[in-house]
Image (cartoon, helix red, strand yellow):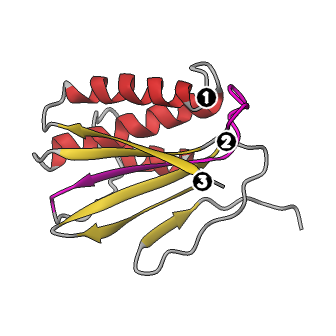
Amino acid sequence: MQELQVQLVVRPDPVEVGRARRWARARLAWGGLADDEPCAEVLILIISELVTNAVVHTGCSAELRLHLPELPGRQGTGAGTVRVEVVDTSARAPQPRHAAGMETHGRGLDLVDGLADRWGWQREGAGKRIWCEVDCTEAGSGPPVLAGAHEHTRAVSTGT
């Protein structure tokens, strides 16, 4: 299957999170995922969390990448797996936190873990790439095996 990759450079400024969401929403719609589709809503929330982490915790510019399955003639079907990547120049590994009570920070990677079908991170140059995949089909194709990467896959019960 062919895919289309689009990317956006995000400056280390919290206002960039809103710009990244608007940009991603437009690219997802172009790829066939309407705003009100559950998969698009999940992807926008994940993008918001990952870009926020990049601009708040690293103080560096980042690059947001979307890998969209090419769906010629299937506009609005939402079929395929969408991959989101945020690449930054900070060597600091992502640190999942478990926020307590009324804390306003520390839930981002927990949200990504709960919403994405697969996610992980890997070193890239002097920095890192945090990625996730969301299957926008009724039945996903299973998690990929990525050598040298830290990967998390949400378990799905098969009833057997």
Name the residue that disc number 3 marks: 117
Amino acid marked by disc 3: Asp
- At a point 73% along the width and 43% down the height, the residue shown is 137
Report the magenta residues as a range. Answer: 72-90
Q: Position of residue 142 (x, y in %)?
A: 69, 64
Amino acid marked by disc 1: Leu
Q: Which mark is residue 136?
A: 2
Under circle 3, the secondary element is loop
Left or right: 14 as drawn, with respect to 30: left
Membership of 79 in magenta stretch: yes
Left or right: 156 as drawn, with respect to 159: left
Residue 75 placement: quadrant: top right
Of mark 3 and mark 2, the one earlier in the sequence is: 3
- At a point 46% along the width and 44% down the height, the residue shown is 111
How far apart are the two marked residues, 3 and 2, measured between alpha carbons? 10 Å
Name the residue that disc number 1 marks: 33
- Nearer the viewer's eye, disc 3 or disc 2? 2
Q: Is residue 46 above or below residue 34?
A: below
Residue 107 placement: quadrant: top left
